[in-house]
Image (spheres, rainbow, N blue to C red):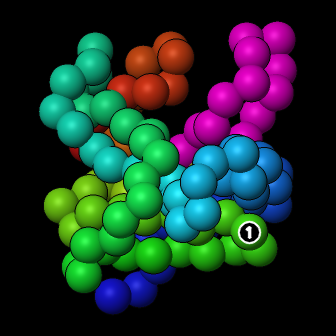
Amino acid sequence: MTAAVTISERAARQIGEILKKEDNGAMLRISVEGGGCSGFQYKFDIDRSKADDDLVIQRDQAIVLVDPASVPFLAGSELDFVDDLMGASFRLNNPNATASCGCGTSFSV
């Protein structure tokens, strides 16, 4: 399985800082769920266990897990971290999304 998601340098640095504050073995899990104002939404969680079929993406101290059901929705995406007037947050630049909501957490394909 090829890497479905890349991690920007800013996101890797922020994920690394978050994971340092967690118990040993913590990883960031990204998943796609039905819901949100555009049909699907991104979910970010801290996870301490990896399933055998998870996609594992690592950059520096950042370890990101993606479950196999979410991989097709995220193929070619880049996880970035932005800090602007709207606040600081992770953003997925997803080429598969045909529309998204104003907050950037939900999308349609």
Looking at the rendering, the stretch of residues picked out in magenta corresponds to 80-92
Residue at 54% across, 58% down:
26
Identify whether 93 is placed above or below 66.
Answer: above
Residue at 60% across, 63% down:
24
The C terminus appears in which quarter of the rendering? top left
Residue 75, quarter of the rendered image: bottom left
* Magenta segment includes 85: yes
Residue 57 image position (x, y, % from top left) = 53, 74
- Which residue is the site of mark 1? 61
The N terminus appears in which quarter of the rendering? bottom left
Q: Can residue 95 be seen here? A: no
Residue 63, quarter of the rendered image: bottom right
Residue 69 image position (x, y, % from top left) = 18, 61
For the stretch drawn in magenta, the main secondary structure is strand
Residue 2 image position (x, y, % from top left) = 41, 86
* Magenta segment includes 88: yes
Count residues near mark 1 (Cα–Cα under 10 Å), then give few for <14, some for 14-19, many for 20+: some
Nearer to the camera, 70 or 24: 24
Is 22 positioned to the left or the right of 85 in the image? left
Nearer to the camera, 10 or 18: 18
Is 40 positioned to the left or the right of 46 in the image? left
Element carrying mark 1 = loop
Which amino acid, mark 1? Gln
Residue 40 image position (x, y, % from top left) = 25, 33
Q: Can residue 36 be seen here? A: yes
Identify whether 86 is placed above or below 22.
Answer: above
Nearer to the camera, 14 or 32: 14
Residue at 28% across, 15% down:
37
Tally of numbered discs: 1
